[in-house]
Amino acid sequence: MTTRDSRTEAQGYSDQVQDPHRSLHSETGALPGEHPGRSGNPLVKVAGLAWVEFEKPDLDQAERFATDFGFAVADRTPETLLLRGRWASSACLVIRRGPQPRFAGAVFQAAARDDLDRLARGTGGTVMAHWGGHAVRLRDPSGFPVHVVYGVPELPALPGRAPLPLNFGAEPVRANATQRPARHPAEIQRLGHVVLGTTRFRAALDWYLDTLGLIVSDFLYLDGHRDRGPAMAFIRCDLGSVPADHHTLAMLLQPRTEYVHSAYQLTDLDEVAASGEYLRERGYRHAWGLGRHIQGSQIFDYWRDPDRLMFEHYADGDVFDSLAEPGWAPLSRSGLAQWGPRATAEFTGTSDPRVVVAAIKALRDKGNEIDMPALRGLIKAMSS
């Protein structure tokens, strides 16, 4: 005889089989005919995000913030500042001297040297020597520079602290020892992801999937407008059976095309929190945190540099292999975190008066995806 509890358990198992997203990473999966979240025949499949590039007029100021935020200086010339994390890799942040602060593009790591030739043939680009390796320079449909590199020498690993031992439940691992994490600059391990806003979301999304072989982990749509397709995507590298970060790139539809933030991995929660206290004491502008995201699950804390560019410390993010299909959920301000303070206007950008000007300009431009229903949907999402 089947009991009520066993029937409930069986139904729960059945629901999970029919809809793995319910207990995995999103509310639902795709509906019939929705975007599949991957290309059927991409030109290449990049292996990761190598570094991000900026231009700034004051490299001394940039270096002060960078070292306070947790980067180590890999090299410094009068015109270029190379910043790195603790793990063995290339420099993860490149800042060149320029007339005004601006994002200058993302650089992806090719899986093989032949992929650069394939990219060049498929895009009309050229393979050129670059920092001891080779690169192809591209531009996405939003206008952002995108480089793909191979063979750039790695910097050796630097010493870094291990995660703190934590006492859980009945089996403590730390006896006769206190926990006193130091309040000092973070020890950034590596670059995790970059987030970009665009008025041409669908064209840019398909370009990254078709050209670089990235695949979608999660889609967010405007509530009440799912039939319009997604308005945000969290996109990861396709490494086959090897788990990859939940997102290497995230993109969202918005009234202006811009860099939103880049994120850098720390050892654990204490490192995120203690280094945040250090930044606060140094007078830097806090944007949002601490909290834990829903899409990606990472513990986060967001800060702005002296030029108001946003950078994220994070720890404990999700990783998926290529079998995980995209989840779908409505975009909302309250849906950005599992716990933590409400997302601030400083983080969402809604306090910036330039948003209104950008929205008017985007509505007049017929070559993008911003129309009145989309604008209303975005306003609703950021206030819900």
Image (tube, rainbow, N blue to C red):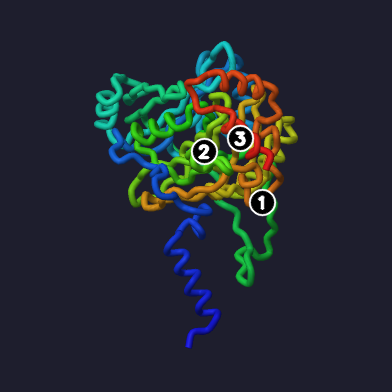
Would you say residue 86 is visible in this rendering?
Answer: no
The span from disc 2 to disc 3 (Cα, nearest Å) is 11 Å
- Disc 2: CA contacts within 10 A as few (<14), some (14-19) or many (>=20): many
Q: Which residue is mark 1?
A: 339
Q: Which residue is mark 2?
A: 232
Foreground residue, 34 or 24?
Answer: 34
Mark 1 residue element: strand
Q: Is residue 151 left or right of residue 292?
A: left
Q: Are marks 1 and 3 in contact (CB under 8 Å)?
A: no
Q: Of marks 2 and 1, which one's residue comes earlier in the chain?
A: 2
Q: Look at discs 2 and 1 and give the one toward the viewer.
A: 2
Q: Look at discs 1 and 3 and give the one toward the viewer.
A: 3
Q: Residue at x 73, y 35 (%)?
A: 280
Q: Residue at x 49, y 43 (%)?
A: 219
Say if 150 sits above or below 179 in the image.
Answer: above
The span from disc 2 to disc 1 (Cα, nearest Å) is 21 Å
Mark 2 belongs to which amino acid?
A: Met
Foreground residue, 344 or 290?
Answer: 344
Mark 3 residue element: helix
Mark 1 belongs to which amino acid?
A: Trp
Would you say residue 333 is visible in this rendering?
Answer: yes
Q: How many marks?
A: 3
The span from disc 1 to disc 3 (Cα, nearest Å) is 22 Å
Mark 3 belongs to which amino acid?
A: Leu
Q: Residue furthest top?
A: 99
| Picture quadrant of residue 375 | top right
